[in-house]
Image: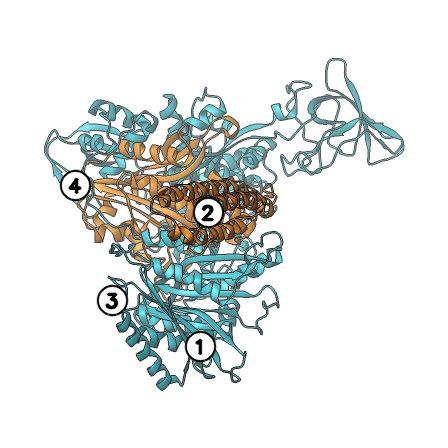
Amino acid sequence: MRVPLSWLREFVDVQLRPEQLADALTLRGLEVRGLERWGGNWGKMVVGELLEVSPHPRADRLQLTKVRIGKDQVLEVVCGARNIAAGQRVPVALVGALMPDGRLIERAEKMGVASEGMLCSGAELDATDDGDGILILDAKAPLGTPISDYLGEDVIDVDVKPNRGDLLSLLGLAREVGAITGSPVKYNARKIAEGSSEVGDGLKLTVADPALAPRVVLRVVDGVTVAAAPDAIQMRLKAAGLRSISNVVDATNYIMLELGKPTHAFDRAGVGSGIQIRLAKAKEQLETLDHVQRTLDASDLVVADERAALALAGVMGGASSEVSATTKSVVIESAVFAPTTIRRSAQRHSLRSEASHRFERGQELDLAPLAADQVAALITTWAGGTVRRGQLDSDPKAVGQTRELAFRPERVRRLIGVNVPDAEQTKLLAGIAISVTEAKGATSVPVTSKRTVSAAKGESLVAVVPPWRRDLELEADIAEEVARLYGYDRITPTLPGRDLPGYLPQPTALRDQVRASLAAQGLSEAVTHALVSPALSDRHAEPVGLVTGLLAEREGAAASEALLLSNPLSADHDQLRRSLLPSLLDRAEANLRYGALSGALFEIGRGYGGTKGGPTEWTRLGVIVWGEIASAAPGGAPRLWDLDELKRLIASVASLCNATPRYLPLEAGDATLLHPGRSARATGEGIAGLIGELHPAAPEWRPSPRILMAELALHGLSSGQPAVRRVLLPPGTPPIQRDVALAAPAGVLIGDLVALAKESVKSALSVELFDLFAGGGMAPGERSVGLRFTFQPDAAAALDDAITAEVDAFTASAAKRHGTKVRGAEAQ
Amino acid sequence: MELAALEKQLRTLQTESIAKIGAAETSAALDDLGSSLLGKRGALTDLLRGIGALSAEDRPKIGAIANEVRAAIDAALSDRRGAAGAAELSALIAAESADPTAPGPLPQVGSLHPISETIGAIARIMASFGFTVAEGQEVEDDVTNFQLLNIPEDHPSRDLWDTLYLREPGRLLRTHTSPGQIRTMRAVQPPIRVILPGRCFRYEAVDASHGFEFHQVEGLLVDRGTTLADLKGILDELARGLFGPSTRTRFRPGYYPFTEPSVAVDVSWGGAKDGWMTILGAGMVHPIVLENGGIDPETHQGFAFGLGVERIAMLRHEIPDLRAFLENDLRMLRGLR
C-alpha cells in the first residue's frame, strides 16, 4: 500500500523523517518495500508568476507570456493553453528540464518568437489528467520554489500482509504509527448536510442472505455535476497509486484509501426502484466496467435491481449504471460482504481489484455507514448536489464488537525467552488499542482453533481486542503482538543447549561422497529442470521408458506414467521428468554451442512418475560426457571419453555404493537415443541403468566429439550410508597373477566369459580383462581375450596346484560352453 | 717355478692391470676387467696355479704378495668405478633433462553445483548444532502443503504462494519445504532438530530473481523450552557461518501462517555492500501446526525457518542472475570451486 505522508499526517502526528518512519515500521512488522519522492523527477521546474499574457502576433492558438521565477528573473515563454491570465502562479519548466514523458525542454522559436521554457499542464507533469489547461497553482505558492518541493510528496510503500486487512487504509496505518510515536490517532468525520427528500423515496434495499452480506448501507446524492476531481485530490490519488476517474468515483476511492472501506457509486438513472443483494442466476449476464461481458455463476454475489445484475458485488461495477458525465444523481453502496464469496468470484473471473483485495481480508461492520456518509460528503464538496435524508441500512444492529481473549503472560515470556513483566505487556498492547484487564476468575485460553486450556485466576489476563483486529484469535497471536511491540531487536540471542535429539544418520552421506568423487574426477555437477516439455520427454521416449522400466523393478515403481500439470506456465515445462538424460543432453548441447568441445556433467536428481498407488519419486545419477577427459600434455595425445572410460567412471561410483556392475547388451527396441553397438544395460548387485554413446541418428550427434551418457539407479543414493569395510591385514607373501589368453569365436560376449571366469575361479581376488584384439592370424570375427587372475595365497607357492586346477577348469568349461581355445597361459 | 719369477709376474700383472683400468671408460668395461683380472678364471687366479710348485716356506710369501696385488687392483677398480659412475650419471641426467619451467598440463577440474554447495554449507553449519538432514517429497497434496500448515482454503494468505497443480485433483508441486515440518513431526518424536533441503515449485514468471523451480532449506526445532531468543541465537550463527564472522543480522516481525510470532531475518556486511538483505523467514512454530503434527503445543514449542538456496548462493558467490543456476554453463560451474 502506497502511503503519501502528507495524507497520513492528517490522522497522526509524525515527527520522524521518512527514512526513520520507514525503519520504525519495518522493525514492527510493517515492511516498507520502498520510500520514494513522488514528483522527484520534476527537475528544473519551478513556481512562476504570470506577469503578462498577450496574443502571439502570428498565431491565434498561441499566447506570449512573461513569467517571473525569482526576484529579478523574468522569462518569456510562448504558451498554447487558454486558461492563463496575469497574476496566476503556474509551474514553469526551464530550459534543460526533462519532462516525465522524456521530452527535453529547449530554447525554441515558436512562430518567430523565442520561448525560454514551458508552462506545464497537469498531464505534462504526470500529476493530474488535465492536458488542456496549465496547472494553476495556489496564489501563495512561493515564487521560484522547485515544483518537486512544492507539489512533490514523500510516499512509503508498505507490504501489508494478508492477515492485516485493517492496514490497507491510512487510518489503520496511522494506528500503528501512533503506537510507535505515542501520538494520538484522530479521525475527523466530515459532516453532511442532508436535504429534504428521503433516501427511501423510490428506492428499496433487500439483502437475500445476510450471511453473504452482513451489512449494506445506501446513500443517495442528487444534483451532482460529474467532472474532474480537484487537482490536489488527483495528485494525492496518483501518489497513492490510483488513477483519477471523476470527482464522484474519486470520492469512493479516496474513502477506500482513507478508511479501507471500498464503496461503489451507481448512476441513479441506471438503477430501478430497488437494490437487491443476491446470488447470481446461473449464466446471468453482466457487462462489467472494463467492458467485458461476463457470464456469472450461481455462487457469484451481485448487486442488482429488480431487472438485472448491476455489479459483481465487492469486485467490480457494471457498465449499465456507470457514473458518467451525464450522471445527475448517484446511489452510494457501502457494504460488508462475506470474504470467501468475494475471493472466489474475483478468482473465477480473474478480476482482482483494489476493492476485492480488501473485501477478501474482511471488513469492519461499523465502516459501512461511516464510509457511505464520508463518500456522500466528498461528493457534495467536489461535485455539488444534495444528500438525501437518511441511509438505507440492511441491519443497523450489525455493529463491530470488541472481543475478549484470555492469555497467560507467563506463556508469552516462555515463548519469546525474555522476561517482559505483566505490566509491560499490558502497556505495549494498550499502544495498539488493546486494553488488558485482570481476569475475574478462571479463564479459557484459546491455544489452537480446536483447543482451549483453562487458566486459574491470576495466571491469565484478558485482552480486549478492537473490532478491526480480526487476525487476533489465539494466545500465540497476543504473544506475537507483545514481541513485535517490545522489539525483536531487544531480545538477547541465546543458544538452545538442552533437549538434544539422539543420533540420526544423514541421508545425504553417501550421495555427498558420490558427488565429491565425481567432482574430483573432473565432472561438474548440473541441476536441470524437473519440469520438461513433451518434446524433451517424448523424443527420447523409448530409452526413458526403458530406464524407468529397468530401474523401476528395483524401486517398486513399475509402469509409471508422466505426471502432467494442470496449469503449466508454458508448454516447455508442462510435465515432470522421468529421466535425467533428455535434460542433460539438452545442457550438453547448449555447452557445445557455447564452445565447450569437451565437458562432463552429472546430476543426482529425482525422476517422477504416476502409478496406480499415486505419484512416486526416485533418485538417479545421470552422467553426460564428451570430448577429452583431460587435455594432452604438450606433444602427447589426449585421453578421450569412450565407453571404457565411462565404465571406469561408473566403477568408481559403484564401488562407493558397494555395487558391482555387469554389462549386458541392449535388447531390441531398447534405445533410440543410444548407439546400438556402443551401449549396454548396467545391472548387478545394487545397480541398474543404461550407459552408452549417443545414437548416430540423434540430432545432437556429431562425428566429434562423441557424446556418452549414463543413467543409473544406485543402491543408497537416496538415503544410504557409506559402507564400513572389513580391513584384512595382507599376508607377507606377494600376490600371484595368472594370465590366460583365449581365442573366442565370433559372437561370444566378453561379459559372459568374465562372468564364467569369476564363477569358476572362486579363489581369485579379481578377474581382469587385460588384453583384447582381433586379426593377427586369427579367424574372421575371432578375438583374443586376455584374462588376468589375481590370487593372494597365505603361503608362497603352496596353492600353485590348486590354482592351476581352478584355471584349467575354467578354460575347459569356456571351451565347452563358448567354443574358446587356449592360446597361451603364463604364471607370474 | 721360483719365487722371484712368480713375484715378477704378479708385479707385472699389477702394473699392466692398473694401466688397463686407468684406460677403461665405462662401468661395463671395468666390470669386465674386474672379472678377467680377479674372477674365478681371471689372470690372477691363473698365475697362482703355479703356487703348487713352490716350497712350503715360499708359499706364504707369495700368498702375501698376491694379496697385495689383488688389493691394489681392487683399489684401482674401485677408484675408476667411482669416476666412471659419476660421469655416467651426469650423462644420464643430461640426456634425460627437459625444460622444467613448462607450466604442465591442467587437470579437468570438476565442481559441485552452487546449489548443492550451498545446501552442503548450510547442512555443515546446522550439523554443529545437532540438526540432521531429512528430505520430503516434491509432489505434495494440498492438505500437507497448505491446510495442515494453517493455510486454509480460500484464505487470502494463499496469495503468497502461486501454485503449480497436477492434473490429479488435490495434488500439487510443493511451493515450499514447509510440508516437511508436518511429515517430520508425524514421523519423529521430539526433541526434533532437522533441516529439510529440496526443490520447490511456484507458478511464477522467470526473471533475474524469480524462477518456477528453486530450492529451499527448511529448519525445524521442537522441544520443551526453545524460545524466540534461541531462534535468534541459532540464526545468528547460521548467518555468520554463511557470510563470515563480521556479518550483522536484523530480526524483524514477518508474517507466515505457520509461525507465530513470525520473523524476517536481514543480514548486512557493511562496507561497499551496505544495506539490509533479507535472507530468510522464520518464527516460532504455530500451535496449530504443532497440533497438526501430533505434538502437544502445551508441552512443546520450537522454531522453524525457511531460506531460498539460490538467494543465499547469489549473495555468497556474487551471482547476479538466478537463471544461471539452471543454465549449467560449464564456464560458470567450473568457476565455482
Chain letter tied to orange? B
- Secondary structure of the residue carrying tag 3 is loop
Mark 2: amino acid: Leu
Closer to the eye: label 2 or 3: 2
Q: Which mark is residue A666?
A: 1
For chain A, the rendered hue is cyan
Task: Rate crowding at label 1 as few (under 14), some (14 to 19) or many (20 or more) other CA atoms within 10 Å.
Answer: many
- Between the C-alphas of marks 3 and 1, the distance is 44 Å
Image quarter of the C terminus of chain A? bottom left
Mark 4: amino acid: Glu
User: Label 4 lies in what chain?
Assistant: B
User: Label 3 lies in what chain?
Assistant: A
- Secondary structure of the residue carrying tag 1 is loop
Picture coordinates of residue A686, whole percent (x, y) = 32, 66
Vertical comparison of A564 with B122: above or below? below
- Between the C-alphas of marks 2 and 3, the distance is 56 Å
Between B107 and A99, the residue placed more toward the observer is B107
Mark 2 vs mark 1: same chain?
no
Q: Which mark is residue A798?
A: 3
**Residue A273 visible here:** no
Picture coordinates of residue A408, whole percent (x, y) = 18, 33
Dot placed on the residue nearer the N-terminal end, 2 or 4: 2
User: Label 1 lies in what chain?
Assistant: A
Residue at mark 2: B6
Between A361 and A258, the residue placed more toward the observer is A361
Residue at mark 4: B298
Mark 2 vs mark 3: same chain?
no
